Amino acid sequence: MTDINNPTLYHMASTVDYPCSVKVVSPGMRIYNRNTQKVVTTSDVLRFLVTGPAGEKQVYTEEEFNTLFDFPDDEKQRKKLMKGKLFKIKASSGTAKTYYLRVPAEERFTIYAKDGSVIQGNVADYSVDHGEGDCVICPAKEDGSPDLDDKSMMNGQVFKERYGV
């Protein structure tokens, strides 16, 4: 079994350009991401729902969104986005520095996330392609080491498309 709590097993990855779509979501909206088998309820803070190339969904704060994605710096477009219009965008290459650990597809694993949710990896759902295996992901701490207190999971096939590894 892969030890997802061993920081020496993690590798650094940066995003590559990939197409996605974005729209602003309302407070209290429940969003189901079938790639992580996780339901997210948006808070009262402005959030952006980004849907990636494999249909994966992720909710970002405005600050996270502005850091990770290329959106035209056009006031007219931004106003349309704020009204809930769906836009095609692309991720900013190399902006997101993420630690990852790929867990072989035949190994099931569980992550107890910082927000209290329980995430299952490599779930036996034949409608979802896990590639070589789902990835445990986490940000870097200030000292550059993996922040294993802030783990999440990304579908292995989606991770390959988003990070090129």
Image (cartoon, helix red, strand yellow):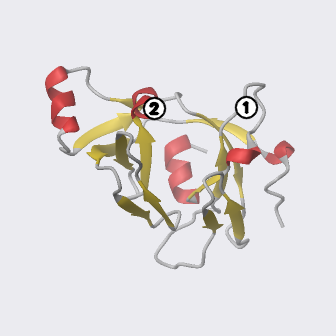
Rendered view: 126 above or below 88: below
From what the image shows, is residue 74 above or below residue 96? above
Q: Is residue 69 above or below residue 116?
A: above
Q: Where is residue 36 drawn, in percent x and y?
A: 53, 63
Mark 1 is surrounded, within 10 Å at the Cα level, by few (under 14), some (14 to 19) or many (20 or more) other residues, namely few
State the CA–CA distance, disc 1 to disc 2. Answer: 18 Å
Dot label at residue 152:
none
Q: Amino acid at mark 2?
A: Leu
Whole-percent x and y of residue 20? 34, 45
Give the number of marks. 2
Q: Give the left or right position of residue 43, taking residue 75 as reference.
A: right
Helix, strand or loop under label 1: loop
Mark 1 or mark 2: whose residue is earlier in sequence: 2
Question: Can you identify the residue that label 2 sits on?
Answer: 68
Q: Secondary structure at mark 2?
A: helix
Residue at 49% of width from left, 71% of height from top? 128
The residue sitting at 69% across, 61% down in the picture is 111
Q: Position of residue 91 (x, y in %)?
A: 41, 35
Please, what is the three-letter code of the amino acid marked with disc 1? Lys
Q: Quarter holding the C terminus? A: top right
Residue with the mark numbered 1: 141
User: Looking at the image, which residue sits at the far front?
Assistant: 44
Residue for point 44% across, 50% down: 58
Q: Position of residue 90 (x, y in %)?
A: 35, 36
